[in-house]
Amino acid sequence: MPQYIVICRMQDPLDPELQRKRAELRPAHIEGASKLQAEGKLLLGGMVQDEAGNPAGSGCICNFDNEAALWEWLDNDPWMLGGVWHSVEVIPFKVAEHYLKH
């Protein structure tokens, strides 16, 4: 299954309205991410930070059947739908097998 690094950035991480919206939508975002993790699609995820440690976006390494399936998830994520994410970078990636063994 193809793997990807995904970096989603906020337009202005210091905008209080954007931070409020991010916090409001976070439970739904985490619920969706947890479902993907249980399905084996989300290997690792977390917060992209600015230099001061403020939330500036999100990053993950994931497995999807193809890039179209990845974009279907991204386009329907609460933070994308809510305008929290401003830009998204998708990079094809291959996790070394020894990191996938538990």
Image (cartoon, grey):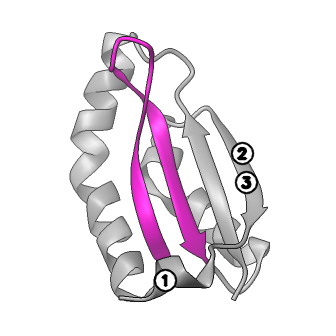
Quadrant holding the N terminus: bottom right
Binning the other alpha carbons within 10 Å of mark 1 as few (below 14), some (14 to 19) or many (20 upward) gives: few
Left or right: residue 64 compared with residue 49: right
The answer, for residue 35, to whether it is visible in the render is yes
Q: Badges 1 and 3: C-beta atoms under 8 Å apart?
A: no
Name the amino acid type tagged 3: Val
The x and y percentages for residue 79 are 44, 46
Left or right: residue 69 compared with residue 100: right
Residue at position x 33%, y 20% from top? 54
Q: Which residue is mark 3?
A: 90
The x and y percentages for residue 41 are 50, 80
Viewer-nearest residue: 98 or 59? 98
Q: Earlier in the sequence, mark 1 or mark 3?
A: 3
Name the amino acid type tagged 1: Leu
Residue at position x 48%, y 58% from top? 77
**Element under disc 3:** strand
The dominant secondary structure in magenta is strand
Specify start and end residues of the magenta stretch as a single range. 42-63
Q: Which residue is mark 2?
A: 89
Q: Marks 1 and 3, how far apart in space?
A: 21 Å
Q: Which residue is mark 1?
A: 100
**Residue pushed farthest front?**
98
Residue at position x 73%, y 81% from top? 2
Q: Marks 1 and 2, how far apart in space?
A: 23 Å
